[in-house]
Amino acid sequence: MRTDILGVGFDDLTLEEAAAAGARLVEEPGFHYAVTPNPEFLLAAKSNPEFRQALLDAHLVLADGVGVAYAAKILGRPLKGRVPGIDFAQRLLSWMSHNGKRLFLLGAKPGVAELAAANLRDSHPGLLICGTHDGYFQEDGPVVEEIRASGADVVFVCLGAPKQEFWMAQHGPDTGAHLMVGLGGSLDVFAGVVERAPAGFQRLGLEWLYRLIKQPSRIGRMAKLPLVLWDAAVARMGGK
Ligand code: UDP
């Protein structure tokens, strides 16, 4: 049973439980995909039914960030915790490096995925990165074919939302991969192109504030957080 937060069902899992669920999906036959919605996703899903459906159809829906956790609390359906996509990815990376699984990195500007691959190989000895591709391609077919030929078990899809969710839902089954994870700007972080907030900010759930101070141009995107909390309060008062 998923926890409904403003029309999107979330899997109520701790980080450890989410990582175990991800690993199970890699082992299961067939194709699966995981999404990591934040408040921006919830607002976009409100006015974009196809995007909402792509979130609902995912096999794992993780609450990325403190905004979704707050909204859940306001709605009276608190989640066990938040599962930042990048932390989920880190857990999965450790598991993959110990279990001989093959990883493909898709997304970000040209050169970034290769840089991320080099850093991840250093930090996770034994990790098998079987391919990379930037996120600014015109045709999907050759990218699908490249992933298929690489024999990837897992693909990190970092094209930004909603592009990455549509891409996973539409093309994932043709790639032969068992799990795709939509991870936004994570390749930029793995590559060291964008710095992640220091641990203190992460612990306090203030990563968004750190990003805002570092990249003030994100203010328009971040302003969506209070809107989601407002929606949650209205829904709660309306008895939803
Ligand atoms: N991106 C991409 N292809 C596109 C548009 C975006 O690969 O057509 C990449 C972009 O370079 C960045 C990531 O997608 O690495 C999106 O980052 P954003 O900061 O929007 O994601 P967030 O982490 O905030 O969800």
Image (cartoon, grey):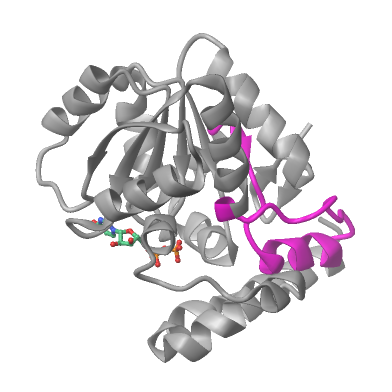
Foreground of the two, 60 or 200: 200
Indicate the quadrant containing the C terminus: top left, top right, bottom left or bottom right. Answer: bottom right
Q: Where does the magenta region start and end?
A: 58-86
Foreground of the two, 105 or 178: 105
Q: Is residue 74 magenta?
A: yes
Residue 13, picture quadrant: top right
Q: Is residue 20 left or right of residue 160?
A: right
Depicted 181 relative to depicted 240: above or below: above
Foreground of the two, 45 or 187: 187
Q: Is residue 131 left or right of residue 17?
A: left
Residue 210, picture quadrant: bottom right
Which residue is pictured at 51% across the width and 9% down the height?
A: 29
Depicted 148 relative to depicted 142: above or below: above
Foreground of the two, 122 or 25: 122
x and y, in percent, of residue 191 in the image = 36, 60
x and y, in percent, of residue 153 in the image = 42, 22
Which residue is pictured at 12% across the width and 30% down the height?
A: 142
Picture quarter with ligand 1 = bottom left
User: Is residue 156 shown to the viewer in this render?
Assistant: yes
Which residue is pictured at 57% across the width and 12% down the height?
A: 28
Q: Is residue 237 left or right of residue 176?
A: right
